[in-house]
Image (tube, helix red, strand yellow):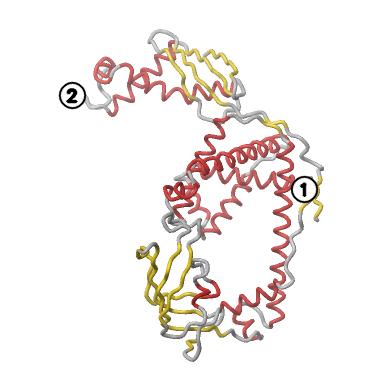
Amino acid sequence: METKIERLPENVVKVEIDVPAKDAVSYYNNAVKRIAQYVNIPGFRKGKAPRSIIEQNVGEERIKHEALESALPKLFSEVIKENNLDVVAQPYVESFKYNLGEDLQITARMELRPEVTLGEYKNITVEVEEYKTSDDALQNSINGLLERSAATVVVTDRKTLADDIVVFDFEGFANGEKIEHGDAKNYTLDLAHSSFIPGFAEQLVDRALGEYFEISVTFPETYHEKKLAGQPAVFKCKINEIKTKVLPELNDEFAQKVGPFKTVDDLKADIQAYLDKQKEDIDRTNSEKAIFEKVVSNAKVEIQQSMIDRESEQLLEEYKQKLQMQGFTWEQAVEAQGYDAIMSNLKEDAQIRVKNSLVIDKIAKEENITVSQADFGAKLAELGRMYQIDTPTMIKQLSQTPGVFNSLSQQALNEKVAKFLADNNNVKFK
């Protein structure tokens, strides 16, 4: 096999492959044998029809395409290896000339990884804003525990307060029409932690048991249902039940109920240890991010548009899946934000992700950072703990989607490079 390589703009190479005639015939004959196994030809058992009969029934062109599809992966692999090409996308055939008895001529294009020129990536100093735990963080955590352990008691001798839980009926109207899905009976709402339209919960305060009343609100401009966005609305309401929270006493007995603690001091010490660990983790994450951003900004790379387009398509699919998980549709997102705005953001994010990935791979190559079997096993174990699945079962499930293994391997490499950069650079907290 002979090859000729021609470099083109946008990190693309044109590859001309000349396959000897005898190999081309061999590919063709093997394709005939494969096709014979599944083509039904009257008068012949599968796999027993001679080549001439197969050619009459399916045609030479189909056989040649079958032969090429089978041969190309091996041919491309040899070209890539022999010419030391760093290919980042599936090669594609531009044209071919396949006449039996003559050399097979193939013209293909291969997209190469852009060359990354690293700037300074070791012994640099970055400034990072230090994370400060608020002075009342410990008390807020304790209050949260008490809140989650609170008992709920029905009250009948007063009006609603801002921290009550109310059970009420409501029916909403906007633009003179009843709001679809804008009504409910005996709906329970925690007034202090409401996710309703702004101003809704506040107007349920100072209401008497059994009281009928109307409240007026305005839907946010960013409301997902466009016909209601920014529109005023009226809700007819009735209070059916008022409940209040009774917090438990903060004592040793309470501490023993919420965890493996003997005293309140033990509980407080555990919460403080968590807060300290949280600060440490946030500072580390912010430091790694700042270092990496500085390293990436120091690097130079010309990224071809095709890489950004492919990454944009991947981000678009991830975005659509995220919307679906949140109960929204792609059409609703386009209507609310605009197609051009969404795609512009995705392309910007794609360019950042591609450059980050290229810089990581370049540093890994320069510093001989690789992913060992132990590193990959640790990622599998981490994923197993997350989903509470043992490692063998996890491997079996992931084997159905091989791309996940590549993703896990890349994650492991990213983490090792991040650690290398953290160990070899300096952080000044401010």
- Disc number lying in front (1 or 2): 1
User: What is the spatial separation of the Cα atoms under label 1 and label 2, in whole angstroms?
Assistant: 72 Å
The residue depicted at 52 percent of the width and 67 percent of the height is 198
Seen in the picture, residue 32 relative to 244 is either above or below; the reply is above
Position of residue 247 relative to residue 199, above or below, is below
**Apparent side of residue 389 relative to residue 303 in the rendered image (left or right):** left
Horizontal placement of 34 versus 11: left or right? left
Is 231 above or below relative to 76? below
Determine which of the numbered discs, if any, sits on residue 303 in the image. none
Question: Residue 375: image x %, image y %?
Answer: 63, 48
The amino acid pointed to by label 2 is: Pro
- Residue 353 placement, left or right of 51: right
Q: Which numbered tag is attached to residue 423?
A: 1
Where residue 371 sits: x, y (%)? 64, 43
Residue that sits furthest to the front in the current view: 176
Rendered-image quadrant of the C terminus = bottom right
Q: Are marks 1 and 2 in contact (CB under 8 Å)?
A: no
Residue beneath disc 2: 42
Q: Which quarter of the picture shows residue 351? A: top right
Question: Mark 1 is on which residue type?
Answer: Asp
Q: Residue at x 64, y 77 (%)?
A: 143
- Residue drawn at x 47%, y 16% is 106
> Is residue 371 visible to the viewer in this orientation of the structure?
yes
x%, y% of residue 39? 26, 27
Label 2 Cα neighbours within 10 Å, binned few <14 / some 14-19 / many ≥20 = few
- Specify the quadrant of the image occupied by residue 171: bottom left
Indicate the position of residue 389 as horizontal and vertical percent values: 50, 58
Q: Is residue 185 left or right of residue 293?
A: left
* Sequence order check, earlier mark of 1 and 2: 2
Asked whether residue 396 is in view, the answer is no
In the image, farthest residue toward the top: 102
Q: Residues within 10 Å of mark 1 (few under 14, many from 20)?
A: few
